[in-house]
Every structure is written in C-alpha cells, then in structure tokens.
Amino acid sequence: MNIQAKKAALEVRVNGEAHAADPVPGQRLSDLLREGLGQRDVKIGCDAGDCGACTVLLDGAPVCACLTPAHQAAGRDVETVQGLNASDPIAARLMQSFLDHGASQCGICTPGMMVSAVALLRDVPEPSEVQVMDALGGVLCRCTGYRKIIDAVRNMPAVAVEAAGHVGEAIQHLDGTDKISAQVEYGDDVAPLGCLEVLVIRSPFPRASFALGNLDGYADSLSLSAVLTAADVQGENSFGVIPGFEDQPVFAEAETRYTGDAVAALVGPRDVLRSIDPADVPIAWTELPAAQDIEAAQLSSAGQLHKGRDNNVMCGGFVKCGDAEAALAKAYVTVEGRFQSGFVEHGYIEPEAGFAEVVNGRVEVHACTQAPIMDLEGLERVLGLDRSKIRILPTAVGGGFGSKLDMSVQPYLAMAALKTGQPVRICYTRTESMRASTKRHPSDITLRIGADR
C-alpha cells in the first residue's frame, strides 16, 4: 500500500450506524472495518478471498471483505456477525441452532459461516442441503468437516429455545455462545488499535549465507522505532518444544536453513511497515546448495546444519518386541515396501498473531498458543529473564492442530516490547505462516509386515 496515496472521505453504515472514514485508495474493507472502526468480529484468515472468514453483508449480499475495496462501501450498508446477532431474528435462531448442533469448534470461521447462512435464510427459509453447501462453499472450516454446520443451518428452529438441561440433551460447548457471537478474542483481536507492529524479515532461499547491511540507517530513513537481530537476543538464540532439542534460532546468524528463516525484525507504524518491500532491506544474500529431502540431508555434501547433529540426524532409536524374524517366517503372507510422504501444512484458518507490552516491569505476551507453559519456558530461555518477569496470556486459538505448540510470534513480540517500551503487535500473512510455521514431518519408511490366516 502506498502510504503517500491521498485519502478520500466517505460515509459507511456498519450495523445500522453511520461512520465517517477516509481510506486510502486500495485499502481493503476488512482493514477499514477492523483497524479503522474496531470491528474485530470480522476475521482475517488469508487476505486473498480463499477462506471466507471475513465475510460480511454489503447491502444484504455476502462478500469477502478482504477482496472488497473500502471505497465500494461508500453510502452502503455493511452488516457483520455482531450486528446480525443483535438485530436479526434469523441470526438469533441460527445462533441457537449452532449451539445445539455443536457447529462451532475453534470458532475462527464461525462469523463467516453465520453471515453467509443468514444471507441464504433471508431468501430461502427452508433450504436444501445443496443450497446450504453452495451458500457456505466460500467459507473454509478446518475443524468440523462441515456436517454439523450444514445440519445447523438446515434444522434451524422456528423459535430459538435454549437448552433446559433435560436428560439426554446434547452438551453444549462452554464457550460456544462467545464463539458464535464473535465475542471471543483471537491473537489479532487483542492488540490496541494504532499500536506499533513488527515485520519479520525472512530468507527468500532454502539455504543461504547473508550479511546484514546498515539496518539502523535504513530504519532511521523510515522513522521506524526499532530493529531486532540476533545481537538483541539477551538469552539463548534458540527455542523448541522438546528439552534438549531447542535448535530453532530466533534470528539466524550468518546462514539460513529454510525459506522463511528469520534474520531481522522491523518495528514501526502499521502503514509504514506495509509499504516495505523486504527486497529493499539492506541484506546481502548468497544462495547456497540446499538439501530438499531426507536422503539429500544425509549426504556429506549437505553439510552439518546444526551442531551436534551428525549426518543431520536429530536422534535415533530402537524398539523391539518379540522375535520379528521368526514371526515373519511363519506368516501366511508378507508384504514389504518403501513408503514416502511429504510434509503437511496444518492449515489452521487463524494465522499466528498476538501483542505484547511491558506492565510494571514484566513483559506480558498475548498470543494464540496451545502451550502457554512451554511459551513461558521458551521465553525465559530466549530473553534471559527470570520467569517472574514474563507473563503469558493465551488468547483463543483459531485452529492449531499441534503446530501452535511451538513458539512463533512470541519471541519477536517480547523482544520488541522490551526494546521499545511500547505495546507491539504482529500478525503473520498467510504466506508467512505457511513458510515459517512447523509442519507434520515428511517420512521415509521401509516396512515388512506379515499376517496369519
């Protein structure tokens, strides 16, 4: 976004209330709603029109707010899930149906689902399954498999009736109401509006050596608040969820090991950071040969990626139970083969996000996490602080599936807050999330199995 672009005043009605706004050309409606008007019930999962979490009604029609220019909302009515829940009787009945059917799990997609379903039910009070699937087809859900959501829409009661606690009634999620009404807060919902943000600069190569240029001068030219590199890590420049295997650097030093490896972070105003092209940051890169699979990583030409990891093997093990060879010899049939699988992206809708601030001499980190205690232990290691000086406040998690056991944004947030003394926030882009997050590991399995009759 060009921060020099001229703003243009407009009026937009959001949930029946008129608002004056002055978005810059090209600004997304989702950005205007969340950052300009504080409508954090509009969720952002991709900023590309793929996930549908940001769906709102524009003059009654469902649209992806991330694909809609803010200027297209001038003089028009925008309805978000909170507005619908407060004023539309269809939404009230649908909320109860979502609760009854357990249709909301992590909840990050629920606002988009609710908005899309209300738009359908206004026109088609008794939709077919195909009509429901078509109406919800633009909203992704990673948790439910869609069945409960479809059933909730098709079987919405004529009158919203709360559960009475009868024997045999389905148990409702304790946080179901908050999720369906978009009251629950995720990682990018908790930061104060207008606070500083963090932009992590990452390697564009699978493996590369690099030299940092005059980052301080670059930051001064843009009036940024701070620059972070490995030199700013006061504790150990490594983290990981398994004790003894903390080998992921917060910031790489001299060499990066994967596309997305962090080398620096810039701290400054949102509009300035969003105008930065990472290729313009003064870093000299030299691409190196990279090992792209398990076999290549074990060749001598791959080099040693981590100290103490000979042949790039993290650990080994041997498990034996009974006499396998004797059992296979007696088996009626045996099958053997080699099976390979690639890595798998966890694919949660909510990207990694959070904010941090220093309160009474203690750094407080609010972030989407599945493991707050491991975050505390990891930050204690990275920051070189006693854990009494660190506080973890977990937000709701918009899908994690194991990947959010690992730290992601937490070190950058804590370091930036400590260095600037101001509240700071971060939210990964979808591309950044997929590049930087941990994955289900690839596998290479050689197997022989036998079976009796």
Image: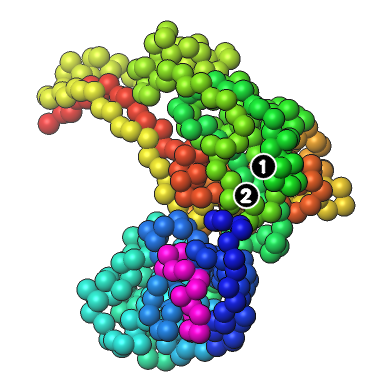
Residues marked 1 and 2 touching at CB (< 8 Å) = yes
Q: Going by the picture, which residue comes out furthest to the right? A: 360
Please state which amino acid type lies under the numbered disc 1. Answer: Leu
Q: Tell me which label, 1 or 2, sits earlier in the chain.
A: 1
Determine the CA span between mark 1 and mark 2.
8 Å
Density class for disc 2 (Cα within 10 Å; few <14, some 14-19, many ≥20) is: many
Left or right: 158 in relation to 349:
left
Left or right: 438 in relation to 387:
left
**Residue 96 horizontal/vertical position (percent):** 46, 81
Left or right: 77 in relation to 363:
left
Quadrant occupied by the C terminus: top left
Residue of label 1: 266
Answer above or below: position of 432 versus 270.
Answer: above
Please state which amino acid type lies under the numbered disc 2. Answer: Leu
Answer above or below: position of 97 versus 141.
Answer: below
Magenta region, residue range: 64-78
Q: Residue at x 51, y 35 (%)?
A: 260
Q: Residue at x 53, y 75 (%)?
A: 181
**Residue 418 horizontal/vertical position (percent):** 79, 43
Residue of label 2: 273
